Amino acid sequence: MSHPSFFIKTFGCQMNSRDSEIMAQTLSEKGYVESMDMETSDLVILNTCSIRAKAEQKVMSLLGMLRNVRKRRPSMRICVAGCVAEQEGARLMERMPHVDLVLGTQNIYQLTTLLDNLDQAGRIATGLSPDYEIPAYIPVIPTFSDEQDRPFRKFLTIMQGCNNFCSYCVVPHTRGREISRKVKDIVAEAQALVDAGIKEITLLGQNVNSFGQTNSVTEDGSPYPFSLLLREISQLNGLKRLRFTTSNPKDLSDDLMRCFSEIDILCHHFHLPVQSGSNAVLKQMNRKYTRELYLDRVAGLRSYCSDISLSTDMIVGFPGETDEDFEQTMDLLETVRFHGSFSFKYSDRPGTRSSAFDNKVEEDLKTRRLQRFQKRQDEISLEHNQSFIDQTVEIMIEKISDEGLAGRTGSNHIVHVNDSNLPPCHPGDLLQVKIDHGGPHSLRGKLPAE
Ligand code: SF4
């Protein structure tokens, strides 16, 4: 009997990557097999992102292409999942009659049931529910004949949605209100990952700092902050590294900062989005913190962990951003000296409050500001990378090839190792490396001398 095939194309953030894995697993459990060829697959899923206009345009152009494929292969099913699906649901069904299923962000676990229902229903669009609970779902890691192919790190979703309503952000509209998973489900999932040989887990949520604050996550309703969850998961035998993302500075507690000095396997890297260095802009963004509070959190993190590497997200050219505001952003960059940053020009996203602001910044000016920010960030990143020279660091091996291997430090720096004396090793193994070169985007090194 032949098994139906599926192809998933994922756009956007780690939350979407994890959702795609869950959809792939639910399909495999029902006998589907994964295909690498979109055009010949029985089911195509586009797991979409609406955080930037560009990602959304790519989805629309792929859907245009699939319209022709579907004409040649009418039995093909097309599903749009993720944030564009949630936001554009009804409009998408209208504009794209060849789309069979619009799968909202809360409905990924029902994928196969909804596919079964398509025969009767014709086409289906799902949406957000106020009573949503993230189901307990245990991941299955398939067995690999070649150790080099075996996955060694995984994302683990601990919460979904967001209640912060930053004025430029679509997430509260596309992923719904914040809901945290039950601690026992999270720990069971982490245990299953470790039992399957996973060495590094990244806990995922839109704002992990507020884990457990909007719903009860324990059987008896007792408070259970994120720092406690980190401590509990760090106890799992066999887990070598623990990471998390993403955080809103306003909810970053002292106890969470302290975890960096108390949990051995917690990687010394913190992604702490700031978005602007100007209090006036932060207010317009509805970020609910000031630059002073942000700098206070940075100082706190560094006091607990002097070598912590910090990265951030920055939006330049937010509506109303003056030259002075932008100088504040440049000044914050000089003060914090982030190891790296994801920086973007502000763009309107449908349904956000800021899209209605009338004091938009000229495109040319946004471009010039972004270039200036990125140039300075690149210089600072290079200086940080060069400061690793002659240091011995521990990397987790990610890739092995004939030329050598590549791995990542706890601080999230990529390290290339080319050494004729490399011991037999696999992805997920830890290795000590002495750095001899720091480039703009990565480091290079060799095994330390005995
Ligand atoms: S904290 Fe703000 S930027 Fe982050 S997901 Fe929530 S609303 Fe969006």
Image (spheres, rainbow, N blue to C red):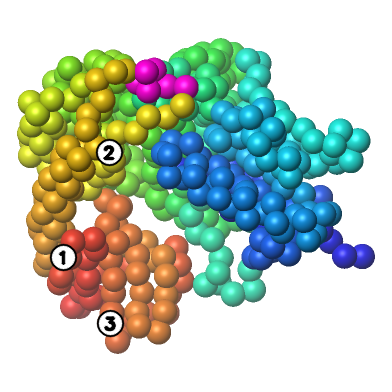
Q: Which image quadrant for residue 33? A: bottom right
Give the mark, 1 or 3, whose residue is nearer the N terminus.
Answer: 3
**Where does residue 159 sit, x and y in percent of width and height?**
52, 29
| Residue identifier under label 3 | 419
Q: Which residue is drawn at 49% across and 14% down?
A: 214
Q: Is residue 352 magenta?
A: yes
The location of residue 305, given as percent across then percent down, is 19, 39
Q: Distance between the residues labelled 2 and 3?
A: 41 Å
Residue that carries the numbered disc 2 in the rendered image:
345
Q: In which quarter of the image is residue 319?
A: top left
User: Do the CB atoms of the residues marked 2 and 3 lie less than 8 Å apart?
Assistant: no
Residue 436 within the magenta-colored segment of the rendering: no
Highlighted range, magenta: 351-356
Q: Which amino acid does label 2 sit on?
A: Lys
Q: Is residue 180 above or below residue 387?
A: above
Q: Is residue 127 toward the left or the right of residue 158 in the image?
A: right
State which tag comes first along the sequence, 2 or 3.
Answer: 2
Displayed quadrant of residue 1: bottom right
